[in-house]
Amino acid sequence: MTAIMEAATEARIVLISVESLREARRIAKSVVKKKLAACVNILLSPVNSIYRWKGKVEITHEYLLVIKTTASGYAALEKEIVRLHSYDVPEIVALPVAKGLPEYLMWLRASVA
């Protein structure tokens, strides 16, 4: 397998939602600084979340983070998010990347320790 194919196979997009913009920035800065993620995008407009929690339907405003990492770096990233997150059970969803610009994927892989 070539390095580019390995980088594509290894790439992950992780989605998390948080209570505040301040929390979003704190988590994003920490995971990039610790090389657990190559990049984090924070949607500055809150999203409207409707979900069931403890038997009740909740409606809240949250901020969405789009985190770029690797499969091998995911466990450490998850641990850091859980450590910093204010929710009892934070949303953390990792999605595989099917394809991408080879140079970007190589950069992503090189950016995550």
Image: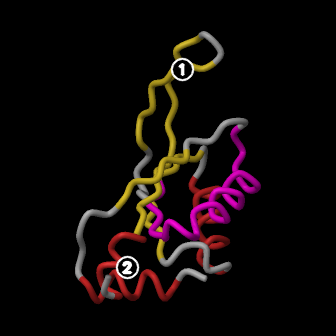
- Give the structural element (helix, strand or loop) at label 2: helix
Quadrant of the frame with the N terminus: bottom left
Q: Earlier in the sequence, mark 2 or mark 1?
A: 2
Indicate which disc residue 38 carries.
none
Query: Looking at this view, is 99 or 6 the one in front?
Result: 6
Q: Which residue is mark 1?
A: 58
* Residue 27 pos. (x, y %): 64, 63
From the image, tell me which residue sits under label 2: 7
- Give residue 101's quadrant in the image: bottom left
Measuring 35% from the left and 88% from the top, which residue is drawn there? 3
Q: Amino acid at mark 1?
A: Glu
Judging depth in this view, the residue of 69 and 32 nearest the camera is 69
Vertical relation: 82 (above or below) 13: above
Quarter holding the C terminus is: bottom right
Quarter-of-image position of residue 79: bottom right
Label 2 neighbour load within 10 Å: few <14, some 14-19, many 20+: many
